[in-house]
Image (cartoon, rainbow, N blue to C red):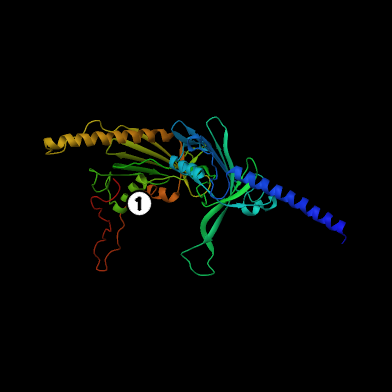
Amino acid sequence: MTRKQFLILVLALIVLGGAGFALFWQDISDYRASGAKIGAKLLPSLKVADVAQIQLRSAKSAVTLIRKENSWVVQERNGYPADFKAISDLIIKLADLKVVQSEVIGESLLPRVELVEPGKGEGAGTQIELRDAAGKLLANVVLGKIILKKDPGNPLPNAQNGVPAGRYVRFLEGKDRVVVVSDPLSIAEAQPGRWLDKDFFKADRIKTLAVANEGGTPWKITRDVEWGQWKFAGGGDLDASSAVGAVNALGNLTFNDVALDVKPDNPSRGTVTAETFDNLIYTLRIGKATSGEDYLVGVTVSGEAPRERQAEKDEKAEQKGQRDKDFAETRKRLESRVGREKALAQWTYVVEAKQIAPLLKTREQMLAQRKPDAEDGGPAQSTRAKAKPGKGKR
């Protein structure tokens, strides 16, 4: 190699090195300016109070959460009340999350870590858009593959990774970047049912329970006092455990989702009516869902709680003041609850079949079973369980 060729080669290396250093320094500058350096917040400019709309989208579903005054609603469920705590947890988490790793991932590798935008091919993640009350975009990211680490509770060397430890995140606004955060953000699901406020009807202190189910004989059970034993209203050998099971099923009813543009009346599977010691009447209309094993349930609440307290027998003067105060506070809470429940009556709910089953028993199934005749020819013995006072739903 001649001296001239050597100098040209050195000059070319200097030029290439300088260009590479310039590009590297530009990337570093952009990285630092973005606030995405390790230890920095994922969304440094995000203010929790500014968020008024959240949209989550996946390849199969989407949900839009909108803040209205001091509450949130789920747009895809006709404005049904949203779970305020779950939404707050998500926003606070996004505002506080810190970057633990920065990644350089080419576009062809995005599907491997599930960072493709929903609707743009395989390997799609969950896109989150945050906006303020005026519709201004505050953040736009895609949550990708959850990073798993070895379960510390399984010391075996061949133990499979299984504990969520972090998640890939891709920024869609500004410079396309990929980072890793230390939280799996498992709550960020694009399912509308996931974000509904699950605080449901609470029919407690039930006095009578009447059921008219499809193809069966209607039945009604009642009790004279709140902790009394259940009995058939028209007489009969009632199975106490079935009675308590039906009452508890109604008192502990929950739902999975809200049905759209459908009523539980057709086909009808049954009607349940419960009267309470608070002068309230809960009426459930139950229908079978078109698919799956779930039921459609509509609930209405009528009646009004007593305005005055009935004095107890042998009540002393010094007890009256405190009991009147307790009664007033209880009635205030009850009025608030009933007001909310009456507002919820406009929707139809999707409820698991196992929750409805105790309420759709036939009268024959509510009867106490009898043992076969004794070997000595004695009369059949009832196996009815005796319900002890204090057991069962109030």
Q: Is residue 289 above or below residue 306?
A: below
For the residue pair 156 and 17, the one nearer the viewer reads as: 17
Residue identifier under label 1: 364
Q: Residue 221 placed where, x, y %?
A: 30, 45
For the residue pair 392 and 93, the one nearer the viewer reads as: 93
Say which quarter of the image contains residue 127: top right
Q: Quadrant of the C terminus?
A: top left
Say which quarter of the image contains residue 233: top left
Q: Is residue 198 left or right of residue 191?
A: left
Q: Residue furthest front?
A: 3
Q: Quadrant of the N terminus?
A: bottom right
Secondary structure state at the residue bearing disc 1: helix
Q: Residue 35 placed where, x, y %?
A: 57, 44
Task: Tell me which amino acid carries mark 1.
Answer: Glu
Q: Residue 123 placed where, x, y %?
A: 64, 51
For the residue pair 39 and 57, the one nearer the viewer reads as: 39
